[in-house]
Amino acid sequence: MRSEWQIFAVATVLALTIAACGGSETPAQNASVKPPSKASIKRAYTMKCSLCHGSDGRLMASKAPDLSQSTLDLESRIALITYGKGTMPPQKGVLDAATIRGIAEYIETFRELK
Ligand code: HEC
């Protein structure tokens, strides 16, 4: 009788522990790992980049190059967007790294628009 009660107690503690862990870990992980949404990347591009590059990358205002003709690789685009170049303003401290990477990936879609 006694040992059955012990097994029940251990099982109950285990179940509670597992439930507690699952409940506390999931929201924290989502907050730190979740990448910016497509919509928020597009919004950031519209606010920070379309002034010179236009919504399709081809505006070429303020001597901005046509992004649909750009051949820069992803890492170079991330560096250029982060640190700026010439009259292009740096985004370091303005946009977070994940959004900068997202924009660098997003503007590559302009290349198919030819
Ligand atoms: C004030 C106008 C301006 C804004 C705003 C601007 N750019 Fe630029 N961008 C430029 C200019 C000018 C260059 C050319 C820099 C140079 O080579 O001297 C450039 C170059 C680039 C290039 C390199 C293209 C190539 O192949 O040489 C990329 C990619 C780019 N911009 C993306 C962006 C993104 C993404 C944003 C928004 C975060 C942005 N730009 C905001 C003016 C701007």
Image (tube, grey):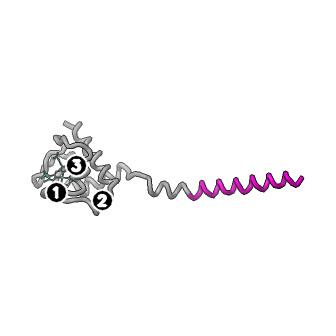
Please report contact status of discs 1 and 2: CB closer than 8 Å, yes or no: no
Residue at image location 26% in from the left, 53% down from the top: 45
Residue at image location 55% in from the left, 56% down from the top: 25
**Percent coordinates x, y for residue 114 in the rendering:** 19, 36
Which one is earlier in the sequence, the residue at label 1 or at label 3? 3
Label 2 is placed on what type of residue?
Answer: Leu
Give the residue pinned by disc 1.
Answer: 88
Which one is earlier in the sequence, the residue at label 2 or at label 3? 3
**Percent coordinates x, y for residue 63 in the rendering:** 10, 52
Mark 1 near ligand 1 (CB under 8 Å)? yes
Give the residue pinned by disc 2.
Answer: 95
Residue 109 colored magenta? Answer: no
- Local SS, label 2: loop
Give the residue pinned by disc 3.
Answer: 55
Label 1 is placed on what type of residue?
Answer: Met
Taking depth in this image into account, of 112 and 84 the one nearest to the observer is: 84
Residue at image location 38% in from the left, 51% down from the top: 37
Q: CA distance from mark 1 to mark 2?
A: 14 Å
Label 3 is placed on what type of residue?
Answer: Ser
Residue at image location 13% in from the left, 58% down from the top: 87
Which one is earlier in the sequence, the residue at label 1 or at label 2? 1
**On the image, which quarter does residue 105 sit in?**
top left
Range shown magenta: 1-24
Q: In this rendering, would 111 be left or right of 64?
A: right
Taking depth in this image into account, of 24 and 53 the one nearest to the observer is: 24
Mark 2 near ligand 1 (CB under 8 Å)? yes
Please report contact status of discs 2 and 3: CB closer than 8 Å, yes or no: no
Instruction: Point out which mark residue 1 bears.
Output: none
Q: Is residue 67 above or below residue 96?
A: above
